[in-house]
C-alpha cells in the first residue's frame, strides 16, 4: 500500500512537469492550430538559462529559496523572449501559408535549436546546480517517503497553472486569446490586434516551459541540448490526450501520463516507460478521438 | 476625427477593385455613403456585396482604387484599426464567438470603447434593443437560436460605439417575423444617428428601409440611386423582386 502511494506521489510530481510543458503546446495549438515542435527545445533552453544564470549569480555556492525564485523568473523571461522570436521570425511570415508548411518549419526550428544547442552549449551533459535545498530530510509517515523537492515542484507547478487559468479566463488578454482561438477574422473585427495576441500566447507558453526547465534541472540535474526531445514529445502526447487546445485537458492529460509512467516503472518494466506514453495515447484516442476534454463545438444554426 | 454632420459624405469608394488570386471579385466600385443614411448593397449571390464590405473593414486588401473615411484614406489598413475609426462590421454568418458567453461576446464588442464609463450605458442600450440577450447573458453563445445570434451580432457591433454600422445579410436564415423585427431595429439604430451600410439578398425589404441603394452584378455596379427610385424601376423589379 505504501509503495502504491509512493508511486502515485511520484507520478503526480512528474505529471505536473509534463503539464507545464503541455500547456504551451495546447495554448499555441488553440490559437494557431499549429503544433509547435520547437516547444520541447524551449524547455531545454529554459534549463540552460537557469544553469548559466545560477552560475553568474553564484547561487551554486549559496542555495536559497530566493535564488530559486529569481532563477525561475530569469528563465521564464528568457524563454518568453525566445518564444516571441520564434513566432516572429519563423511562424508569422507563414501566417497565410498552408498549414503543412508551418508544421515543417516547426520541425526545422526544433532541429535548429537542438543542434545549435549542441554546437554552442556542448553535447556533453552539464550538471545543474542545487540552487535550492529544502530544509529537513524526506517527509512522510512510516515507509512512505516524499522528497521535499518533489513537493516544491508540485506546489510551484500548481501555482503557475492557477495563474495561467486566471489569465486565460479572467483577464482581458485571456478573453482576446479565446476570441482569436475561435476565429482570427472575427477577433480582428472587434479591434483585437491578433498578431500581438498570438505573440503574447507564445510568450506565456514559453515562460511555462522555462519554469519547467528549471524544475527538471533541480530534480534530474543532468541537462544537455537534446533533453527537450522526449519530454517535449510526451507533453505533446499529454496535450492531445486531454484534448488539444483545452487548458484543463492539458493538465489532466499530463497528470494521467505521469501516473501511468510511474506505475509502469514501479510494477512492471521500467524499459517500457517511454512506449507507454504512446500506448496510453492510442487507447484513449480509440475511445475518445477528441481527447478526454475535447468536444465538438455546440453550434446551432 | 471631425464631428459628423447629417448629409455629409462619410465614406467614399473610388474605383475600388479586389482580387482573390486571379479572380476579380469587385471591379471599379464607386459610390458614396452619406452620414445618417441607410445605404443598401443588393444583388445576387457572388455579386461582390460581401467583398465590398470586407474591403472597407480591412479583411481583404484592395488591388486598385481607394476608400476614404472623412477624407482619410483607409483602404488596406488592418481590420483592428478600422474599428477604432468607429466603423463596426457585423460579418457574414454573424461572427459570434460560440465558445464564449453572450456577455463575453458583448464585452469583446466594446474592446475599442474609448471610455469605461460608457460601457454600462452601451450595455443597457443593447439590452433594451434586444431584451432576449439580457435573459441569456450568462449563457454560452453557441446555445442561442439563429435569431438570437443575429441580435447578439448586432448588439455586439453596437458596443463599439460605431458611427458607421456594416451589416452583412442580417436576415439570412431567419423566420419572417424575426426578419421584420431586425429591420425595425435597423431603422431605429439609424434614427438614433448611426449610418448603416446594409448588404442584403432580401432586396425588397432592404430597399424599403434604405435611403440609397446600390445594385451589384458580377462585381460591378449596374445601378444606384435613391432606394425609392430603385424600388420603382422596372429593371430592379424584374431582376430582384421577382416580378
Image (tube, rainbow, N blue to C red):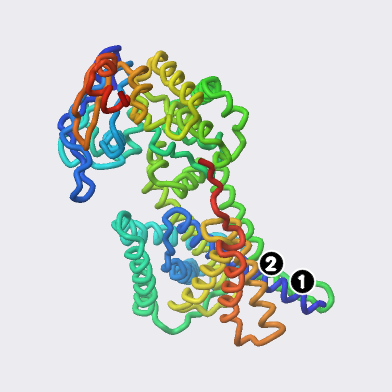
Earlier sequence position, callout 1 versus callout 2: 1
User: Where is residue A5 shown, x and y percent of the image?
Assistant: 77, 74
The answer to which of A80 and B12 lies nearer the viewer is: B12
**Circle 2 sits on which residue?**
A151
Q: Residues within 10 Å of mark 2 (few under 14, many from 20)?
A: some
Question: What residue is rendered at 54% in x and 64% in y?
Answer: A239
Question: What residue is rendered at 49% in x and 64% in y?
Answer: A210
The subunit letter for the residue under badge 2 reads: A
Left or right: residue B77 versus residue B66 is right
Residue A52 shows in this picture: no
**Circle 1 sits on which residue?**
A139
CB within 8 Å, label 1 to label 2: yes
The subunit letter for the residue under badge 1 reads: A
Against B229, residue A193 (above or below) is: below
User: Where is residue B202 shown, x and y percent of the image?
Assistant: 37, 28
Q: How much space separates mark 1 and mark 2, taking CA atoms?
A: 9 Å
- Quarter of the image for residue B168 reads top left
Q: Quadrant of the N terminus of chain A?
A: bottom right
Amino acid at each position: 500500500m505504501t509503495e502504491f502511494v509512493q508511486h502515485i506521489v511520484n507520478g503526480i510530481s512528474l505529471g505536473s512537469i509534463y503539464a507545464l510543458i503541455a500547456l504551451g503546446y495546447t495554448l499555441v495549438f488553440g490559437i494557431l492550430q499549429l503544433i509547435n515542435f520547437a516547444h520541447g527545445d524551449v524547455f531545454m533552453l529554459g534549463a540552460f538559462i537557469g544553469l548559466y544564470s545560477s552560475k553568474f549569480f553564484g547561487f551554486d555556492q549559496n542555495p536559497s529559496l530566493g535564488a530559486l525564485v529569481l532563477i525561475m523568473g530569469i528563465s521564464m523571461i528568457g524563454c518568453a523572449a525566445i518564444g516571441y522570436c520564434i513566432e516572429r521570425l519563423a511562424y508569422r511570415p507563414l501566417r497565410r501559408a498552408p498549414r503543412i508548411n508551418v508544421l515543417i518549419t516547426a520541425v526545422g526550428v526544433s532541429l535548429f535549436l537542438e543542434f545549435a544547442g549542441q554546437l554552442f552549449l556542448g553535447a556533453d551533459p552539464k550538471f545543474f546546480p542545487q540552487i535550492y535545498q529544502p530544509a529537513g530530510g524526506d517527509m512522510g509517515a512510516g515507509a512512505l517517503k516524499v522528497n521535499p523537492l518533489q513537493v516544491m515542484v508540485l506546489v510551484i507547478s500548481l501555482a503557475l497553472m492557477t495563474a495561467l487559468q486566471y489569465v486565460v479566463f479572467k483577464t482581458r488578454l485571456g478573453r482576446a486569446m479565446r476570441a482569436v482561438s475561435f476565429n482570427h477574422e472575427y477577433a480582428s473585427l472587434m479591434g483585437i490586434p491578433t498578431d500581438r495576441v498570438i505573440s503574447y500566447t507564445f510568450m506565456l507558453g514559453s515562460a511555462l516551459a522555462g519554469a519547467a526547465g528549471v524544475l527538471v534541472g533541480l530534480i534530474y540535474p543532468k541537462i544537455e541540448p537534446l533533453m527537450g526531445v522526449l519530454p517535449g514529445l510526451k507533453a505533446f502526447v499529454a496535450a492531445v490526450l486531454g484534448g488539444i487546445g483545452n487548458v484543463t485537458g492539458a493538465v489532466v492529460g499530463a497528470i494521467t501520463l505521469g501516473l501511468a509512467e510511474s506505475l509502469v516503472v514501479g510494477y512492471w518494466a521500467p524499459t517500457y516507460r517511454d512506449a507507454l506514453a504512446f500506448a496510453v495515447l492510442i487507447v484513449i484516442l480509440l475511445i475518445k478521438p477528441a481527447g478526454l476534454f475535447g468536444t465538438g463545438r455546440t453550434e446551432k444554426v | 476625427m471631425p464631428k459628423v454632420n447629417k448629409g455629409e459624405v462619410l465614406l467614399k469608394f473610388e474605383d475600388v477593385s479586389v482580387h482573390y488570386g486571379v479572380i476579380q471579385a469587385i471591379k471599379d466600385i464607386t459610390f458614396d455613403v452619406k452620414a445618417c443614411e441607410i445605404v443598401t448593397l443588393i444583388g445576387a449571390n457572388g455579386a461582390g456585396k460581401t467583398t465590398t464590405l470586407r474591403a472597407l473593414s480591412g479583411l481583404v486588401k484592395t488591388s486598385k482604387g481607394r476608400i476614404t473615411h472623412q477624407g482619410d484614406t483607409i483602404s488596406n489598413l488592418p481590420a483592428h484599426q478600422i474599428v477604432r475609426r468607429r466603423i463596426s462590421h457585423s460579418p457574414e454568418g454573424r461572427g459570434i464567438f460560440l465558445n464564449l458567453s453572450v456577455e463575453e461576446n458583448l464585452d469583446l464588442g466594446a474592446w475599442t470603447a474609448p471610455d469605461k464609463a460608457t460601457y454600462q450605458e452601451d450595455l443597457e442600450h443593447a439590452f433594451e434593443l434586444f431584451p432576449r440577450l439580457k435573459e441569456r447573458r450568462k449563457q454560452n453563445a453557441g446555445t442561442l437560436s439563429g435569431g438570437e445570434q443575429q441580435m447578439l451580432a448586432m448588439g455586439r457591433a453596437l458596443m463599439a460605439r460605431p458611427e458607421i454600422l456594416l451589416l452583412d445579410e442580417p436576415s439570412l436564415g431567419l423566420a419572417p417575423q424575426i426578419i421584420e423585427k431586425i429591420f425595425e431595429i435597423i431603422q431605429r439604430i439609424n434614427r438614433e444617428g448611426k449610418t448603416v451600410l446594409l448588404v442584403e439578398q432580401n432586396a425588397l425589404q432592404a430597399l424599403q428601409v434604405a435611403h440609397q441603394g446600390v445594385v451589384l452584378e458580377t462585381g460591378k455596379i449596374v445601378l444606384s440611386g435613391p432606394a425609392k427610385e430603385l424600388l420603382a424601376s422596372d429593371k430592379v423589379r424584374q431582376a430582384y423582386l421577382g416580378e
